[in-house]
Image (cartoon, rainbow, N blue to C red):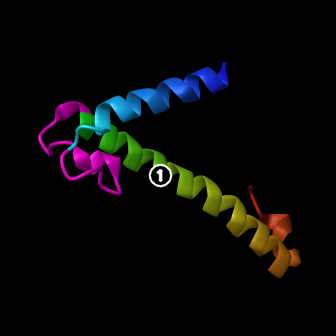
Amino acid sequence: VAGLLYLCVGVLGCVEFLPVPGGVRGNVLNSYRIDDALINVGRIALGLTVSIGIALMVIPCRSAIRRLTCPDASAGDAD
């Protein structure tokens, strides 16, 4: 099932971006017009996903570093 989905996404990507004059840019979202409402929703969603993902990685890392460097302070740690 996963392989079929991967194949479909690849084929549809080729169908969408092969006829682009000058090729595809490094960021695929930059290949679309700036006033395309659906792509702007995708840009906002991608920005939120990255922002939330960074926070989800940084908070546990901060807690682990704090526990390693200050073992006495971990008793009062609420997380």
Is 36 in front, or is 44? 36
Name the residue carrying label 1.
50
Tell me how many marks there are: 1
Q: Picture coordinates of residue 52 (x, y %)?
A: 51, 50
Quadrant holding the N terminus: top right
In the image: residue 62, left or right of residue 52: right
- Residue range of the region highlighted in magenta in the rendering: 21-38
| 32 magenta-colored | yes
Image vertical order of residue 49 relative to residue 11, above or below? below
In the image: residue 27, left or right of residue 61: left
What's the residue at 25%, 37% (across, down)? 39
* Amino acid at dot 1: Val
Quadrant holding the C terminus: bottom right
What's the residue at 40%, 27% (across, down)? 12
Q: Picture coordinates of residue 58 (x, y %)?
A: 62, 63
Q: Secondary structure at mark 1?
A: helix
Q: Residues within 10 Å of mark 1 (few under 14, many from 20)?
A: few
Is 52 in front, or is 19? 19
* Residue 78 picture quarter: bottom right
Q: Main secondary structure of the magenta part?
A: loop
Is 47 in front, or is 58? 47
Residue lying farthest to the top in this orientation: 1
In the image: residue 66, left or right of residue 14: right
Q: Picture coordinates of residue 19 (x, y %)?
A: 23, 37
What's the residue at 78%, 67% (across, down)? 64
| 18 magenta-colored | no
Q: Picture coordinates of residue 22 (x, y %)?
A: 20, 53
Residue lying farthest to the left in this orientation: 35
